[in-house]
Each structure stands twice: as structure tokens, then as C-alpha cells.
Image (cartoon, grey):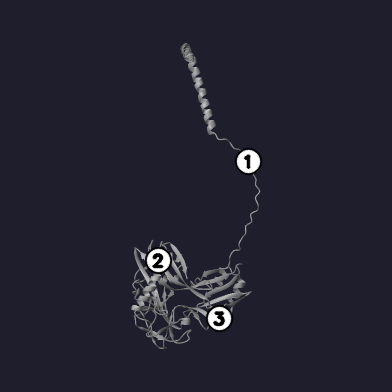
Amino acid sequence: MAFTKHIYYILQLIKQRIRKHPIRWVISAIILLFFLILLIIGLTAQKQNPTRYHAEKVVINLPDVSIKTMPSNQNFWRDEVVQVGDTIDMVLKRFNISEAEIKRITSLDIIQKQVKHLQVNQVFSILTDNSGKLTDIQFFDDDDNGEKNLIALKKSGENWQVDVGSVDTETLLTLKAVVIKTSARGALAQAGVPVEIRESLREIFRDKIDINTLESGDKIRLIYDSLYYRGQQLATGDIRAAEISRYGNLYQAYFYESGNDGNGQYYDIAGKPLRKGFSSAPVEGARISSPFGIRFHPIRKTLRMHSGIDYAVASGTPIRAPSDGVVTSIGVKGGYGNAIMLRHNASMETLYGHMSAFANIKAGQHVRSGDIIGYVGSTGVSTGPHLHYEVLINGQAVNPTSVALPTKTLNTHELADFKKKQRVWKQQLSSVPNQSVTITQMD
């Protein structure tokens, strides 16, 4: 109670003082409030400002770092594509081979005697060792006779010699899936599909769809043969299976041959012929003695690329136009001897070589299917009477049996065999996802 009375007394005293001196007390209160605000600001700033650290330089001596460098692998094949007007010297110079080395190579007997000229778009390959030194050269020469012989050279010391070792070839399946962005031709080329495969693909689907009309988003999948020699791809063979997807529609082609004579043709998923082909063969009752593609010469021990098919038939046998066409050339044509070329449409030409004589026709003349254009012979570079028959699509040789000859209808046994093989091809095509470019080697 006494404490309460004291407080009450003090408050009454302050009240009296304020009444007597109000201005003084107001000023005192303002000053007190100002100092309280400064005190609060100071305390708040002190809490917000973290403790300041001073940077110090610290040096730590670390052990030396040892980096082991692996020698770069120079042991690989390099390719150059032959351009118009190229000679062997010009191609070798693009590999940065010295003038002295080029002279040693081009002075070899095999180059001087057998290599007449290089073919445009063919691949010229060299192999270097781990030190980058040139060790091997290989390419196909063109004998201007529908055949190209493999020239394989190997360096021994400072000298070059023909590689006559065992011919070790391997055929692998190449699978590619392409999504069209601008054009089919450009997309296939960008995916590394060889020009002969691109032209064959266009011709296979000619009666179903024009590949040149494919647009962005359309898809192409295909499997074709690739032939390798000493680890280097030398050539391509037939397209084994192909699918084209456009506007939700699927176009399919599957290669089938009932025997091993190279006389295979293309069928749809149901086993029906995909193309009509020509109305007849150029000669009647003849067998194919030499098929299209790579073959090994058992006597010369060399690989040869045959750009057409040969019909073994008696000299003088009439050669007939297998389809309507226009005679674009007639006369002697290098190793083909007496030869005729017919143009059948904007992209397809056929060639007939080694004729003994021509029929009464001339360049620019229209011929109808079945008309006699000449007679079988053995002119030019030929070992005996036969007809060399080529089919060219935009200048590229393709297998005549697959796109030009009449397509046979499969019998019951052949159809069952086709269905079995077709399911395998379809499964392999379906294994590739829809990517812009996919390349897979399957052995």
C-alpha cells in the first residue's frame, strides 16, 4: 500500500509540473522519443549486419599432375569420290600424297595396262597405318565393258605391289530409316544411302508412288546389301526390303528369288508383283550366265563388279526391244563392241552389247516392244557369243532382273517361302525407331 501511494504521489507531482510548464515537458518528451528511435535503429542495424570476414591468401602446393596421352589411331580407310574429268593423279593429290609417291603408284604395270579411266561417283580408297603412312589403295577400274575390276595395291617397304592375297569378302545388311524434312532425295543422300540404291528405290515403287513427291514427315525404311573387302565397303547389292509411309499409307516392297540365279524381283506384303516390268526379255529361251553385282573370278583371282546381266545364247539370235523406246545411240561402244541404247522413259535406259549386227534402225527412231534391234554376237571385249544387257536409271546401273524384266507370279510353294522371309524382313524394319537418320549394321 505504501508503494502504491508513492507512485500515486509521483504521478500527481508530474501532472502539476506539466500544467505549470507544458512546453518544457513536450520538448523533453520529443527529445526522449528521438533518442529512443535512434536506439532502436542502432540495435536493428547491429542485428542485420553479419560479422565481416577478412580475405586471406592461402597457398597449397599440390603434386604435379601426370597425364598419359594415348597415340592417335591413324589406321583407317579414307575415301574420295571420283568427279567428272578426274584422273588417278588428281584423286591421289586430294589425299595429300606426295608427287614422288603418286609417280611410283601410277607407273605400276597394272595401272598402265589395265586402268583406262575412273568412273564418276565411284569410291577411291586409301588406308594409313598408326603413323599416318600410306599402306593400301583400292578402287574399281572401268574396262568400258560392263565390268569393273578391283585394283588392290599394298605397299611393301618403299615399293608397291598388287595384293594377290586371298580375297576375303563379306556381305552385310545395311538398315536405314529416314524421316523426310525437305525432299526424299536430299534426306536419303544425307543419311548416306548410295546413289544406286536411291535410284533403285525410286524405280521399285514407280508403279505405286513417286518418291520425289514425298514431303516433310514422310518416312522411308530400307534394308540393302553392302559388300565389304578388308573392312572397306566396296559396293552395294540389292535392296532386300523397303517401306514408305505417307499420309498414314504404308507402301512395302520385298525382294524374293526362288533360286540362286540372281533373278530376284519385288513383291508387296501379299506376295503380288510390285511392278509390271517390261513385257518380255530381250532374248528368248536364254539363261543368265553372269548375274548383276560383285563376283569373284576363279582364274584371275580378282573381284569384278558386273553392271548388267549376260545371256548365254547362240550367235545370231535376234535381240528384241523388251519395251517401247527410242534409239539414243547405235554403233561401236568401246569394250561393248556393237551396242545399242534405248530410252524408255525420262529416267530409264537399256544397253545391249556385243552384237554381231544391227537391225535396220537408226538413232532417234522409235521402236516398239518386240521389234528386232540386232543380233547376238561376240564383238568388243568378249570371250564368246552372249548378250550383255544393262538397265540404267538416271545413268546409274541397277539390277535388270529386279526392275525391268517381266515379274513372275509366285506359285503356292514359292508364296509360302516368300511369306516366311517377308516376316523376317518386316520384323527387322520394325526394329528401327522413327528417328531422322538411323544406321545399323546387322551381320
Q: Nearer the viewer, residue 81 or 117?
A: 81
Query: Residue 377 has which mark?
Result: none
Q: Which residue is drawn at 46% across and 66% down?
A: 439
Residue 87 image position (x, y, % from top left): 54, 73
Residue 246 image position (x, y, % from top left): 35, 64
Q: Nearer the viewer, residue 418 or 283?
A: 418
The secondary element bearing badge 3 is classed as helix
**Mark 1 belongs to which amino acid?**
Glu
Q: Is residue 345 visible?
A: no
Q: Residue at x 61, y 71 (%)?
A: 99
Please name the residue that numbered disc 3 is placed on. 113
Location of residue 239 (image quadrant): bottom left
Q: Which residue is drawn at 56% across and 70% down?
A: 127
Foreground label between 3 and 2 = 2
**Mark 3 belongs to which amino acid?**
Lys
Classed neighbour count for the residue bearing mark 2: other residues with Cα under 10 Å, few (<14), some (14–19), many (≥20): few
Q: Which of 69 and 88 is in front in this view?
A: 69
Tell me the CA gap for discs 3 and 2: 49 Å
Q: Is residue 47 above or below residue 57?
A: above
Please name the residue that numbered disc 1 is placed on. 56
Please name the residue that numbered disc 2 is placed on. 430
Tell me the CA gap for discs 3 and 1: 81 Å
Foreground label between 3 and 1 = 1
Q: Is residue 108 visible?
A: yes
Q: How many marks?
A: 3
Tell me the CA gap for discs 1 and 2: 65 Å
Classed neighbour count for the residue bearing mark 1: other residues with Cα under 10 Å, few (<14), some (14–19), many (≥20): few
Tag 1 or tag 3, which sits nearer the N-term? Answer: 1
